[in-house]
Amino acid sequence: MKDTCIFCKIIREEIPTKKIYENENFLSIPDANPRVEGHSLVISKKHFENILDMPTSLGQELIDCIKKTSLKLMDEKKAKGFNVINNNFKVAGQIVKHVHFHIIPRKKDDGEIKFINKS
Ligand code: AMP
Ligand code: ZN
């Protein structure tokens, strides 16, 4: 799996990509098919299929990568907020079986994502 996994290939630098931020265990990159300007992905450097396979001890570095990436994107894209989305298993929309977190920069009235919108 690791040999053919698209995100493992990015980590091994077999596929060139722009690095937004990285720490020891995580890397953030632009999504190849962005839903909005700045849509990016935080991916683990080791191959875990989903969040359930990822050791809890990596939580601190994961949050570090999410925070640094989101702050950079909000600044660069002049966004006022962001969503963090993590799909686990096919039924939840996971296509790439290597744990990753979508960072979606948000602007007022962009209307892009609606889960539970009370107003
Ligand atoms: P998911 O449905 O959560 O598995 O989403 C996988 C995401 O990976 C999609 O948004 C794809 O556009 C993105 N993706 C697939 N291949 C690449 C790639 N080589 N570089 C960057 N993003 C990718
Ligand atoms: Zn992988």
Image (tube, rainbow, N blue to C red):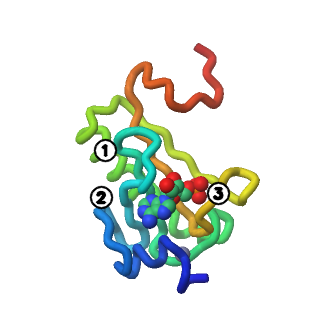
Spatial CA span between label 1 and label 2: 9 Å
Label 3 C-beta lies within 8 Å of the nearest ligand 1 atom: yes
How crowded pointer 1 is (Cα within 10 Å; few <14, some 14-19, many 20+) is rated as: many
> Does mark 1's beta carbon lie closer than 8 Å to ligand 1?
no
Residue at 45% over, 47% down? 103
Give the SS element for disc 2: loop
Residue under label 3: 94
The answer to whether 108 is drawn above or below residue 6 in the figure is: above
Rendered position, 11 above or below 93:
below
Is residue 61 visible to the viewer in this orientation of the structure? no
Image quadrant for the N terminus? bottom right
**Hey, which residue is sitting farthest bottom in the picture?**
3
Question: Quick one: 88 or 60, which is closer to the camera?
Answer: 88
Residue at mark 3 to residue at mark 2: CA–CA distance = 22 Å
- The CA distance from mark 3 to mark 1 is 23 Å
Q: Earlier in the sequence, mark 3 or mark 1?
A: 1
Residue under pointer 2? 20
Badge 2 density bin: few <14, some 14–19, many ≥20, Cα 10 Å: some
Amino acid type indicated by mark 2: Ile
**Badge 1 amino acid:** Leu
Q: Residue 101 location in percent, x, y? A: 51, 55
* Residue 73, numbered label: 1
